[in-house]
């Protein structure tokens, strides 16, 4: 049985670091711009080693790709489920769909997922988390960027038609932008580097192992601190309540429920199934807000979800662990 106290402890530790960042932001000890630069450094430089080391240290034949299948299938199910928006009486259906997609599908596997995973299970099994992160960059991110580009072109074309100009079409420049976003993702590059090194079968040199460890250890505390600074500049609920509650339920209840279904269908071992479900119950990644800010779509729901899912994720995870224990589902 899982030690619930350990899960609560890691959650409180993470919230404490965010609180320090929040206070530093409120009292202007750290500016929003300074935190953005620091966060960009962590994302662009330090995410690669933290993911590469978890895969590079394992033998390639020991790496299980089923967690990626589960994460991808869960994302597909949620993306399709959100299409119900198109039959609801909302003003801009595509805009509403796009703004909900990223906050419920882009999961924080790294910053919160890794420490929580390593608190519950053996850290040597953390490759499960690395593999699952690929679903964000191979499916969720490209889908969001593509739909955002389509919506932006449609919005721009309305003005063009009013001015008697020729409408713009979705073409190669937009496709190229999506491809560039995919291949330059530090998360994707880190996983690729780890998989390639693992496939060589070479032992990990001490220098490389220590380099990856030192570089990767920066990610958790710095990301949580920057996240706290980020929260100090945003309102706690910056979207409609119906959208907020619906997205919250999808993130912490419906997505893990889809994971339960797919783990059962794929007949995964009990322990691996639990790991996959708990990882899909993680909060919305702060990257979701950064992407929303870059496209100008859904900054309110993104910032709201990033904050509240981070707070609620520990109770949600405890709920799923408790449910597994009392039902005997996916016994380890």
Image: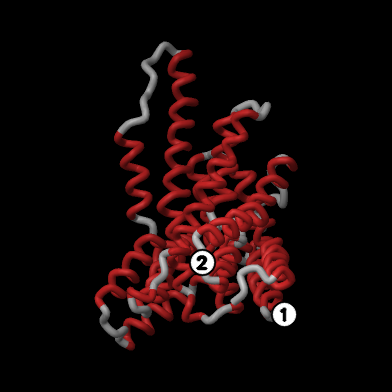
Horizontal placement of 301 versus 48: left or right? right
Q: Residue 331, percent across and down?
A: 62, 74
Horizontal placement of 218 versus 299: left or right? left
Residue 183, picture quadrant: bottom left
Task: In this rendered view, identify the residue nearer to me: 328 or 145.
Answer: 328
Residue, disc 1: 5
Which residue appears at 33% of the width and 46% of the height?
179
Residue 15 in sight in this render: no
Task: In this rendered view, identify the residue nearer to me: 73 or 17.
Answer: 73
Q: Is the image coloured rainbow, by chain, by secondary structure, or in one colour? A: secondary structure
Task: In this rendered view, identify the residue nearer to me: 227 or 71.
Answer: 71
Q: Residue 148, percent across and down?
A: 47, 37
Residue 324 in sight in this render: yes
Q: Residue furthest bottom?
A: 206
Q: Residue 176, percent across and down?
A: 31, 41
The residues bearing labels 1 and 2 have C-alpha atoms spaced at a distance of 27 Å
Q: Nearer the viewer, mark 1 or mark 2?
A: 2
Give the position of the C terminus as an image quadrant: bottom right
Residue 64, picture quadrant: bottom left
The numbered disc on residue 268 is: 2
Q: Residue 159, percent across and down?
A: 48, 19
Picture layout, residue 13 above or below residue 84:
below
Q: Residues within 10 Å of mark 1 (few under 14, many from 20)?
A: few
Which residue appears at 64% of the width and 44% of the height?
300
Which residue appears at 32% of the width and 86% of the height?
207
Q: Residue furthest top?
A: 164
Which residue appears at 45% of the width and 67% of the height?
130
Picture layout, residue 329 above or below residue 33:
below
Residue 31, picture quadrant: bottom right
Per the image, label 1 sits on a secondary structure element best described as helix
Discs 1, 2 touching: Cβ within 8 Å: no
């Amino acid at each position: 049985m899982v030690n619930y106290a350990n899960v609560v402890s890691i959650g409180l530790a993470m919230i404490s670091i965010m609180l320090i960042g929040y206070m530093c932001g409120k009292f202007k000890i750290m500016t929003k711009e300074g935190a953005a630069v620091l966060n960009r450094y962590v994302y662009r430089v330090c995410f690669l080693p933290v993911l590469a080391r978890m895969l590079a240290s394992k033998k390639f034949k020991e790496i299980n790709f089923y967690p990626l299948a589960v994460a991808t299938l869960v994302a597909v199910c949620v993306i399709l489920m959100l299409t119900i928006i198109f039959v609801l009486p909302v003003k801009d259906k595509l805009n509403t769909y796009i703004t909900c997609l990223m906050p419920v599908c882009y999961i924080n596997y790294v910053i919160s997922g890794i420490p929580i995973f390593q608190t519950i299970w053996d850290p040597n099994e953390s490759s499960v988390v690395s593999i699952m992160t690929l679903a964000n960059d191979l499916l969720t991110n490209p889908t969001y960027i593509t739909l955002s580009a389509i919506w932006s072109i449609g919005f721009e074309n309305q003005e063009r038609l009013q001015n008697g100009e020729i409408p713009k079409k979705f073409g190669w420049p937009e496709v190229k932008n999506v491809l560039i976003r995919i291949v330059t993702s530090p998360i994707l590059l880190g996983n690729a580097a780890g998989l390639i090194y693992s496939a060589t079968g070479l032992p990990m040199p001490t220098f490389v192992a220590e380099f990856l460890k030192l570089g990767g250890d920066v990610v958790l505390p710095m990301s949580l601190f920057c996240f706290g600074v980020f929260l100090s500049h945003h309102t706690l609920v910056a979207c409609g309540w119906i959208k907020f509650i619906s997205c919250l339920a999808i993130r912490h209840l419906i997505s893990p429920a889809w994971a339960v279904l797919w783990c059962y269908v794929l007949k995964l071992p009990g322990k691996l199934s639990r790991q996959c479900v708990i990882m899909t119950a993680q909060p919305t990644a702060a990257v979701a807000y950064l992407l929303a800010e870059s496209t100008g779509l859904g900054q309110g729901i993104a910032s709201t979800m990033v904050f509240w899912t981070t707070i609620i994720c520990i109770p949600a995870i405890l709920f799923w662990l408790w449910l597994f224990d009392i039902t005997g589902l996916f016994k380890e």
